Image: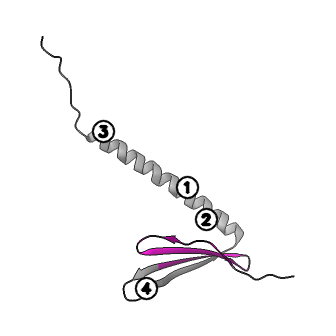
Amino acid sequence: MQTNTAVKFLPIFSDEKKVEVSLEDRQAIIKLSTWTEDLGWCGQKTMSLDAEMLDDLHRVISAARIKLIRQKTENQEEIENLTAKVLQFPAVS
């Protein structure tokens, strides 16, 4: 018995972008849409990935996420190091 039903996952939204993921015919379908005034959601890109490519994409996205988090942490540390520090002088008795 062959089932050809598509499985859809909840989309990921930002103010002007939307990513949709679904499974169809043993492929993961990833669709990127952007919001345009007067037109609504407009499809920009669609990718079909098999299971192996999806695993590779997951690894690449995870590595990019880790790098971005590290950069954010390093930038925050730099900002904290640049902020003025108040030195307390000993009180005169």
Is 14 left, or right, of 55 in this rendering? left
Secondary element type, mark 3: helix
Q: Residue 81 — which label?
A: 3
Quarter of the rendering containing residue 28: bottom right
Residue shown at 55% from the left, 72% from the top: 11
- Closest to the observer, 73 or 39: 39
Mark closer to the chain start, 1 or 2? 2
Mark closer to the chain start, 3 or 4? 4
Task: Look at the image and give the residue range highlighted in magenta.
Answer: 7-33
Q: Residues within 10 Å of mark 4 (few under 14, many from 20)?
A: few
Secondary element type, mark 1: helix
Report which residue position mark 4 lands on: 40
Report which residue position mark 1 lands on: 63
Kindly give the residue lying farthest to the left in the view shown.
Answer: 92
The amino acid type of the residue labelled 3 equals Asn
CA separation, marks 3 and 2? 36 Å
Q: Quadrant of the N terminus?
A: bottom right
